[in-house]
Image: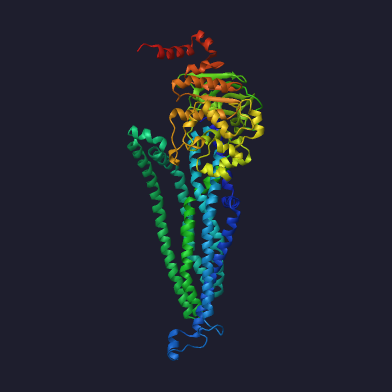
Amino acid sequence: MNQNSEKCMRCREAGMKKCRKKFVFWRILVWTFCAAPVGVSVVLLAGILHSVFLVLQTVCMQVFFERVSAAGLPALTAARHPAGSTPDGWLSFGNGGVLECMLVLAGVIAAGLIFGTIHNAVVEGVSFRVSKEFSRRLQKQTARFPAEAFEDTSFLERHENAKRGVDQSVFFMNVCFLIATYYVPYFVLMGIYLAMLKPVFLAALLLIFLPVLIQQRYRSRSFAKFEQETVRDRRMFEYYEGCMTKLEFFKETRLLGAYRFFEGLFLEALERYDRKEWRVQVRSGIRQMLIKCLTLAGYLAVLLLFVWEVWNGGVSVGAFAALFTSLNTMFRIMEELVCGHVGRISENYASIRNYTAFLDLEPVNGTITEIGEGNPEIRAEHLDFRYPGCEAEVLKDVSFTVHSGETVAVVGENGAGKSTLLKVLCGQYLPTGGCLRINGKCTRELEWEAFEESLSGVFQNYVRYGMTLFENVAVSESRRLDGEAFAALESRRLDGEAITALESRRLDGEAFAVSGSRRLNEEVSAASGSRRMGKACEEETYGDTVEKILKKCGFPVERMPEGLSTMLSREFGGIDLSGGQWQKAAIARGCFRERGVLILDEPTAAIDPLEERHMYRLFEEICRDRTAVIITHRLAAARAADRILVMENGRLAEQGTHDELLQAKGAYWRMYELQKQNYTASV
């Protein structure tokens, strides 16, 4: 493990200890209220009123049964009165009549149902908004970590546990609201009611559920241990499942007949996970069964206690009838709380704690927030690098300088270290030895956002976004949109004609011109106008700029069914592009992002030879007046650079211009001769 990983590890451990000292409930509560303040307030109020009316039902039942008892039982009434007659006051208002009690009881029951329905309906909406907020926090925190963290098994396991904690945190907060606004008020008010009748009733109920609470404590510990022990198995079977079902794996997995191989690995990992879960569930189930037997015995004991008190005149018949009717409700609610909600929290509380612990992690980051104006100079001073968990150095004592505005090509055989050097230059990794300086500032001292903001690039392993053609290009420069247009690009909520056009995926160049929210920010356009391809001016719309860049890259915009708004994903009802067209779109995306440093990583890997020469001329144009680094194995692309760096076995073997390196007859000359033979050898 290299020094950077060790620093991140110490940082993570510090974050875990810090989180344990904080009360998770209050943090989740604050985040929940910030996500939906009005909804949370309605949930709290409706829950409290629901519990109050539920207790009032018991009180009203007691009054009702006592009125019925005082007025005379139906059997006695039939014996005392002639057929067709009724006693005075039996169904009359006032004078102790029963009808008014029935109406009050019905009103109380109806009010409880209404507030319960409101509570359940609002909880659904609040849960959705809170889930989005918790996911946003996780994504924002994840984006703060460098690429090397995602090759650290420990970090990946923490991240996986945190993802599981999002849904569990939402459920945890819902249960906390239920406890605070429904269960606690209900049991407090019922406790007061029982204590007023007979304090022994309250004590008996508390003793019944004490073993249940103790059992849930053990359950929480068991599942917390299970959560930590199975995270790797869970990650493995989810990965193998993706190899069988995800689109990016589908073609190769089926074509090479590897489906059954991954199916076997998936089932094996799933079986390991199931065995561990089964052991935990069996132990927990046995304890829970014993506890429920004790609870049932206690339930019967309480019923006998009620009968005993009525027999001895300790409570009235009306109170007994109300308590007997409500006893099943109390046990149902208590079991729902302890065995249902608290039980699930006990199982998943470790995930909730893992989620908050992940948000506490503080990645190692620099303090310098600005690199400087103009095209930066890049200077590598004795760079060394090895990947996390590896002992071998991939880069060894690499030193070079890329002057401001200079274009440098990096060439070498497979395994020479080109890709690793690219990752270090892009800030994805910090060197384990030596220093990389941008405008004289060491990358270890730079904030990652400041470093990344100075770069643009075209990469060999480009991303095929499932969005429109316009969005596939403009996503690289979304910060240049003004406030209204940026919000529209993010939320897809353009108003007026634009929302109809965007949602129907028919927003072509003319519609972009109509939509004022798609205009370039004037100040940014003026500052970068000298560089922008096609000489875009401040009056030019984003749609026009994107279209010009795409056409300059050789992309056939006119052949797209819906122009710039063509959806490039079959999953969302759109189309798919060829490999060459996707790479041209990726090149346009990199060109559209105006930055002082441009990184080109095998930019013509999927381009046919007929268009490759055109792309080389394009690269010469876009690299002009920028600091550019081209990573390639095609020496035709390297020839156009101001200087060429030749990597060999992780070291910088030689550097110079194309002609200088050919005269030196070193590693570059050998590569050149080999490639030349591929074209000149007789067939």
Q: Name the residue at 45% across, 87% down.
A: 77
Task: Tell me the colour scheme of the image.
Answer: rainbow
Q: Is residue 655 above or below residue 210?
A: above
Query: Is residue 145 at all visible to an observer of this figure?
Result: no
Given residues 678 and 236, the one toward you in this image is 678
Image-based side of 538 in relation to 171, left or right: right
User: Is 71 or 470 nearer to us in this picture?
Assistant: 470
Residue at (60, 58) in percent of width and height = 41
Residue 437 in the image: state x and y as whole percent: 61, 24
Q: Position of residue 280 (x, y in %)?
A: 41, 50
Is 365 above or below relative to 293? above
Q: How many numbered marks have been drawn onto this rendered protein structure?
A: 0
Point out residue 520 in the picture as x, y percentages from the top left corner: 62, 34
Closest to the observer, 235 or 10:
235
In which quadrant will I find the C terminus?
Answer: top left
Above/below status of 608 relative to 15:
above
Name the residue at 53% across, 26% down. Answer: 552
Could you say which is closer to the camera, residue 645 or residue 429? 645
Task: Give residue 8's position: percent from left, percent from top.
Answer: 55, 35
Residue 179 shows in the view: yes
Q: Residue furthest top?
A: 663
